[in-house]
Image (cartoon, helix red, strand yellow):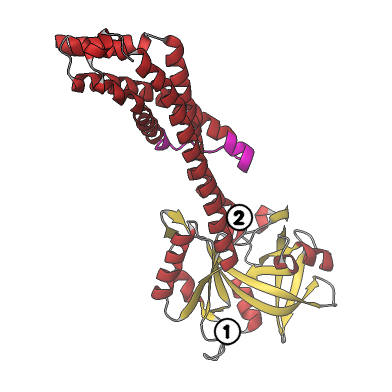
Amino acid sequence: MPTTAMFWRIVRRLLTANYARLFVILLALGAGAAVTSALLNLQIDAKRRLTTEFRALGANVIVAPRDAGTDGNGATLDEAVLGQLPAHHEGKPVPAVAFLYVIGEIAKAGEIHFEPAVIAGTQGHGLTEIRPGRRSEYVAALESDPEACEIGAKAATQFAVHAEDSLQLRNEGRTAACKVFAVVATGGAEDTQLFTRLGTAQSLANLPGRISLIQLSVTGTPDSLNHFIAHLGQSLPGVDVRGIKQLAEAEGRIYNRISGLLSATVILVLILTSLCVMAGMSNVAIERKNDVGLMKAIGGSVRRVVRLFLAEAILMGIVGGLVGSAIGLLVSIWLGKAVFGVAAQPRWIVYPFSVAITVIVSIASAFPLRRLASIRPASVFRGEA
């Protein structure tokens, strides 16, 4: 116990012998830890943020007929396929909506002039996630109506209709009616379409129980998405399952670039931190030459001397890492808001990881102290360099 107490007393004296030098080394370690934890937290959050942003663009997986026109029902699927799709992927829900497209005719209720339009019957959950855009008009009370329908912004202008207006639909002598509960603007082809219940579209097309395709919005990395598509294709051998290549490739390419840039920056910062700390440790080695010679002269072993300086480096790494990493996590929240418009969520796994990296950098930067182990007490007492 006395030996241990003496050991830590010497370590404390080593740390406090020069407060200016101690401050500079801790500042370098803390700055390195702050930048490291901030960038690592941003790197982890970037994956989640990019995935969220790309999911806002709509569906990224499509389930479609494999052989068009060979079953007597045209290029359609059995609507039972919708119920065979997984509801979750990696613990997250998978919005899936079945569509049946019909080229029919539409007229405002009470008018006799019909114009051609695409009528899309839908069934499933998560239509707003599958189809990007916003509702410029919306009447919630009508959404549950069996005859409820949505209309694209351009189609609404074309037919001069608004929410709560009624429409007449027809196709090859078959007719139906619907009441508009929302006007949706997507900036895409959906702006010219009318969205009805799946049963309404099936009745107009005379295709009971059939659908054109199913769109899904799957959250996950590009590799995870490819695995999901492959697994779904094996479980549904009679259909064609494919991803929207442009979305998957763009998401993976952007994340790889961001991840590579952040990783390179972290490595550069750690190298600069090591050089700063190493410069401070070089001065320490020069100043403590006489102290080490004295310790050896009174019987101190090389191993014990090395342990003293190693303990000093570890303590400085822990203190600098704890303070710097905490500051870095706070900085990452601000950076996330500046880059993505939404504050980054602190990932607490980054904190111990960043502290550990800082301790390793501190130990590695103590390399100049190794030459103290070769000092001979006689040389020190004679005043030799």
Residue at 77 percent of width and 62 percent of height: 153
Which percent across, then down, holds residue 211?
Answer: 56, 77
Tag 2 or tag 1, which sits nearer the N-term?
2
Asked if 255 appears above or below 295 in the picture, the reply is below
Mark 2: secondary structure: loop
Task: Return the residue at label 2.
Answer: 56
Label 2: few (<14), some or many (≥20) within 10 Å?
some
Asked if 336 appears above or below 239 in the picture, the reply is above
Report which quarter residue 340 is drawn in. top right
User: Disc 1 to disc 2, how far (Cα)?
Assistant: 28 Å
* Residue type at the position of mark 1: Ala
Residue 7 visible in the picture = no
Residue 342 on the magenta segment? yes
Task: Return the residue at label 1.
Answer: 75
Left/right placement of residue 140 relative to residue 11 reads right
Residue 21 visible in the picture = yes
In which quadrant is the C terminus drawn?
top left
Left/right placement of residue 92 relative to residue 184 reads left
Q: Are marks 1 and 2 in contact (CB under 8 Å)?
A: no
* Residue type at the position of mark 2: Ala
Which percent across, then down, holds residue 63?
Answer: 52, 73
Which percent across, then down, holds residue 245?
Answer: 56, 68
Report which quarter residue 253 is drawn in. bottom right
Which stretch did the figure color magenta? 335-351
Report which quarter residue 195 is drawn in. bottom right
Residue 182 on the magenta segment? no
- Tag nearer the camera, 1 or 2: 2
Label 1: few (<14), some or many (≥20) within 10 Å?
some
Mark 1: secondary structure: loop
